[in-house]
Image (tube, coloured by chain):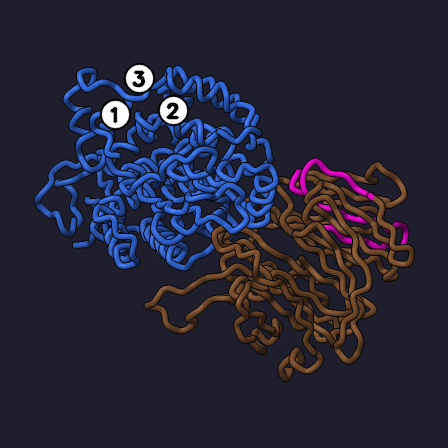
Chain colours: A brown, B blue
């Protein structure tokens, strides 16, 4: 259930079929504002660029647009299988909603029409996606990885061999110093994140992977516990990244210095999702069971939390060389 | 004398007559032919360097030793370690060319690859990682067949769906099949499989009743069939239910044989996949069709598919002849299962087809059933006799 926040409102979708909105004040207080329901668990949410609408993707195979001013939600998309990802695309000549689904298609919707503007086939079920105009990246099952370019109209740019050996779990695009998207970070179930540049000057050196969300880091004789990386988010200002995992921890990393900035204490539940607010001051992460150990470990009595954390200081990158 | 390069590669045409030095077997073997046919290594090298060719034999050799080490049925990690390390040794013994003393570069790479894979597998199992993931030994190469890719959300969705439709045991049997499918492929069991497969029931199971004493191990008691309770199907025996790649079946068999020693494995093996094994119990071939229409309709990873339906049903069948009709009735007593009625009625009639009477078995088959685990190549195709079932 990913939270998103521009304008210091927090939206979170959950497996209880609902989407909730809170207002976050500077003091850290949150005020619940509104709620919308789907008929199936909500898998992804995202904001429109002006912050007036929220798009929600659900296992009921639809996606809805929620107008916050009027508190109305209308369906804008339909798939043949649960919709796993949803992103808003704002291009100079068009704007649309991109939905990725387990029916192996990527559909682009003009919110006013009930037919998709475009349908792109994916090699497999869509597991995660991210969009920063003009680049979109989609990671699918069977270790598929596709990059799209969104100028004039979305088209497939390149299929990339996955730098990871296991199932993809989450992906996030990062920008370079000129604020243009230049690469992405890909997380897998194996506690590993790969940093991949799209057009690097030196691919062998620039692209790398690092291990994270494992217990027992140095002791190699005892078995490590390896946890899935559930979410990756990049700090909008500093360019440093945060990862959250099934081990119930979050970590901050500096990919340019290739160092870890911080690892949190362990929460008692896995952290399912995370994100930053628009200026990077607040880091939100959601603590709830992510099904990483099957149903036996599901305890419906445990409460789910979303934590907000002051992120302005901790994510500053290390000193540049 | 100079060392003969061709000899090092195992293909010197002159053999004894060669003017160069043949280290190691200087006078031993005469007139060797360039390509010793018995060399597995050569075969692997000459066929394309595609990793899939390498992987299948290696995983095969891997699982057999694990099968051996699992005899004591200790799900502790210690046995894993020994199993894995022996497998590594044996894997290399298997893959080493007995003729060439120093290995060529290709061999080294393959060895490294095998090593890497074995290590990865060890880590994977021991670490409590998510099981349902594809895997490839080298980045940027294609995946190894036999692994299915299911995300946690999909699994959870399955769970939710089945919860609402009151079909929890179908979900469980599906998970179990997925587990058993994934597990034999890398000789899982113990930690992960048990946690995944054993249906410790969540609180909100509507009809839980007394069905708490589940156990994954075959020899322990099966839950007594209580009416309407979802107790039964968790003991679905380990099916190496047909994965998409047929080669994975061969790899799963050895592990499979030891997983559930004796009876249930025999029965379940025969049910494994009527298409694949060609067993074709007459009563069952019709069922997968009807069952597939049931709760498996949810679009989960294709590997589940119809095989899980066979599994769920066959599992109930193979349990015991006495409790047979009851158990099948219970497993599918939930009314939402449209196929339940024909199933339960059909089950009793197929009772006698499930188990062969002892006199119909050949001596070899009988011996196989009586032994603790099957030996490869001699796995009986008929179901076991009723008398040998150990309930």
Q: Secondary structure at mark 1?
A: loop
Please indicate whether residue A193 sits to the left or right of residue B113 in the image. Answer: right
Q: Main secondary structure of the magenta part?
A: strand
| Residue B216 percent across, percent down from the top left | 35, 44
Report the disc number at residue B325.
Answer: 2
Ranked by sequence position, the earlier of labels 1 and 2 is 2
Total tally of numbered discs in the picture: 3
The CA distance from mark 3 to mark 2 is 12 Å
Which chain is home to disc 1?
A: B
Q: What residue did someone put label 3 on?
A: B352
Q: Which residues are magenta?
A: A75-103
**Are the residues at dot 3 and dot 1 in contact (C-beta closer than 8 Å)?**
no
User: Which is more toward the observer, B230 or B4?
Assistant: B230
Which of the two discs, 1 and 2, sits closer to the camera? 2
The answer as to whether the residues below labels 3 and 2 share one chain is: yes
Q: Position of residue A294 (x, y in %)?
A: 49, 51
Asked whether the residues under the numbered discs 1 and 2 touch, taking CB atoms below 8 Å apart as contact, a structural biologist would say no
Mark 2: few/some/many CA within 10 Å (<14, 14-19, 20+): many
Seen in the picture, residue B386 relative to A101 is either above or below; the reply is above
């Amino acid at each position: 259930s990913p939270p998103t926040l521009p304008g210091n409102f927090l939206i979170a979708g959950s497996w209880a079929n609902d989407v909730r909105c809170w207002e976050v004040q500077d003091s850290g207080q949150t005020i619940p504002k509104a709620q919308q329901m789907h008929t199936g668990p909500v898998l992804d949410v995202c904001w429109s660029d002006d912050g007036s609408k929220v798009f929600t993707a659900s296992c009921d195979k639809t996606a809805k647009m929620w107008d916050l001013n009027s508190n109305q939600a209308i369906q804008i998309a339909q798939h043949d299988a649960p919709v796993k990802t949803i992103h808003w695309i704002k291009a100079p000549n068009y704007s649309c909603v991109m939905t990725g689904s387990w029916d192996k298609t990527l559909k682009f919707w003009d919110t006013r029409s009930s037919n998709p503007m475009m349908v792109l086939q994916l090699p497999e079920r869509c597991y995660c996606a991210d969009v920063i105009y003009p680049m979109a990246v989609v990671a699918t099952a069977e270790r598929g990885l596709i990059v799209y370019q969104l100028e004039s109209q979305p088209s497939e740019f390149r299929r990339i061999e996955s730098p990871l050996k296991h199932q993809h779990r989450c992906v996030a695009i990062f920008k370079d110093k000129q604020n243009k998207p230049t690469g992405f970070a890909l997380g897998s179930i194996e506690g590993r994140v790969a940093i991949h540049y799209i057009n690097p000057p030196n691919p062998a050196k620039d692209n790398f992977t690092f291990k994270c969300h494992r217990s027992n880091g140095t002791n190699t004789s005892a078995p490590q516990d390896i946890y899935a990386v559930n979410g990756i988010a990049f700090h909008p200002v500093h360019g440093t990244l945060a990862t959250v995992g099934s081990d119930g921890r979050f970590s901050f990393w500096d990919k340019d210095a290739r160092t870890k900035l911080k690892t949190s204490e362990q929460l008692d539940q896995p952290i399912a999702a995370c994100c930053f607010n628009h200026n990077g001051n607040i880091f939100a992460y959601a603590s709830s069971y992510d099904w990483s150990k099957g149903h036996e470990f599901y305890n419906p009595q445990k409460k789910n939390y979303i934590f907000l954390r002051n992120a302005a200081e901790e994510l500053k990158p290390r000193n540049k060389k | 004398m100079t060392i003969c390069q061709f000899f090092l590669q195992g293909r010197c045409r002159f053999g004894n007559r060669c003017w160069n030095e043949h280290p190691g077997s200087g006078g031993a073997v005469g007139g060797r032919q360039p390509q010793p046919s018995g060399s597995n290594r050569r075969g692997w090298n000459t066929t394309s360097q595609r990793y899939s060719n390498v992987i299948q034999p290696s995983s095969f050799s891997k699982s057999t030793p694990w099968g051996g080490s699992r005899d004591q049925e200790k799900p502790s990690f210690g046995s894993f370690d020994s199993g894995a390390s022996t497998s590594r040794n044996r894997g290399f013994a298997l893959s080493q060319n007995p003729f060439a003393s120093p290995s060529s570069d290709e061999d080294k790479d393959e060895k490294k690859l095998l090593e890497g894979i074995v290590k990865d597998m060890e880590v994977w199992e021991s670490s409590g990682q998510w099981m349902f993931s594809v895997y490839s030994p080298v980045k940027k190469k294609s995946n190894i067949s036999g692994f299915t890719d299911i995300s946690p959300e999909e699994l959870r969705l399955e769970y939710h769906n089945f919860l609402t439709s009151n079909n929890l045991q179908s979900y469980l049997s599906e998970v179990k099949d997925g587990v058993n499918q994934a597990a034999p492929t890398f000789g899982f069991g113990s930690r992960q499989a048990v946690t995944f497969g054993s249906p410790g029931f969540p609180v909100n199971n509507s009809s839980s009743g007394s069905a708490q004493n589940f156990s994954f191990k075959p020899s322990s008691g099966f839950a007594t069939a209580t009416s309407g309770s979802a107790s039964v199907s968790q003991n679905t025996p380990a099916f190496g239910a047909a994965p998409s790649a047929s080669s994975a079946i061969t790899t799963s068999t050895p592990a499979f044989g030891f997983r559930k020693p004796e009876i249930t494995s025999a029965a379940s093996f025969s049910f494994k996949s009527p298409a694949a094994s060609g067993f074709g119990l007459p009563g069952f071939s019709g069922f997968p069709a009807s069952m597939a229409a049931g709760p498996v309709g949810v679009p989960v990873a294709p590997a589940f598919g119809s095989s899980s339906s066979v599994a769920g049903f066959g599992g109930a069948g193979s349990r015991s002849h006495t409790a047979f009709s009851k158990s099948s009735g219970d497993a599918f007593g939930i009314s939402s299962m449209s196929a339940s009625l024909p199933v339960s009625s059909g089950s009793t009639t197929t009772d006698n087809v499930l188990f062969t009477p002892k006199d119909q078995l050949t001596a070899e088959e009988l011996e196989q059933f009586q032994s603790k685990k099957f030996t490869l190549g001699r796995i009986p195709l008929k179901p076991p006799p009723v008398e040998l079932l150990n309930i």
